[in-house]
Image (cartoon, rainbow, N blue to C red):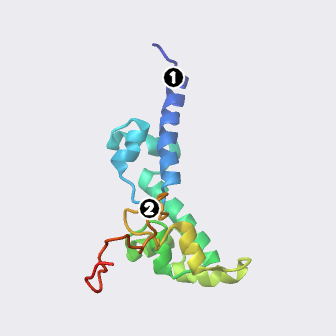
Amino acid sequence: MVTSPDEARLAQLRRLRLAKDVMDRDWAEPLDLDAVAGHAGYSRYHFIRAFKGAYGSTPGQYLTRRRIERAEELLRSANLSVTEICSLVGFSSLGTFSTSFKKQTGLTPSAYRDLHVGRAASVIPGCYAMLWYGGRDARAPGSGSGVPAPGAPAPGARGAGSKDSNSGEAE
């Protein structure tokens, strides 16, 4: 099959867009560059070169910029600590978050909040923001949605014949 240079370029951009969509969707999660590159059908290193050629920044720079944009939003509108926001937007290190934030905005996260806190319509209580962004999830690890399956006992309920873990006696 013979394709024109324009068709080949459009096909490349479509594949890169698939990977960019993954980064946009899962921006707060730790992302594996090899897996993201796989969405575009590229090796890790070819993906970095192609992404930078198409979008003007590396995938890592793009993801950092998106995370900082989300952090700006939370600093303006949510009653959360800088450490909580750092974790919610996908940074594992407060130092890296603060350095990246200052590099992009010119201000530290705390200074940014102090400058913008009065400008938001109202500050969202931290507990709601944490639930909205998925932080401090109340579900048990590996429990899926946190909702018991139909017919399954409610969390903490004991069936007949189960042992009471506190007394060691059967019911």
Please tell me which of labels 1 and 2 falls first in the chain.
1
Q: Is residue 63 above or below residue 97?
A: above
Displayed quadrant of residue 44: top left
Amino acid residing under circle 1? Pro
- 136 or 139: nearer the viewer: 139
The structure residue drawn at horizontal position 49% and vertical position 67%, both measured from the top left corner, is 89
The picture places residue 166, in percent across and down from the top left corner, at: 30, 85
Q: In the rendering, at what x and y percent does residue 163 appear?
A: 29, 76
Where's the N terminus, which quadrant? top left
- Look at discs 1 and 2 and give the one toward the viewer: 2
Can the viewer see residue 48? no
Q: Secondary structure at mark 2?
A: loop
* Residue 91 at least partly seen: yes
Query: Which amino acid lies under the numbered mark 2 shown in the image of this protein?
Result: Ala
Which quarter of the rendering shows the C terminus? bottom left
Q: Residues within 10 Å of mark 1 (few under 14, many from 20)?
A: few
Closer-to-camera residue (28/94): 28
Number of numbered markers: 2
- Report the front residue among 147 and 84: 147
Q: Is residue 3 above or below residue 97?
A: above
Residue 114, image x, y percentages: 61, 85
Q: CA distance from mark 1 to mark 2?
A: 58 Å
Which residue is denoted by mark 1 in the rendering? 5
Mark 1–mark 2 CB contact (< 8 Å): no
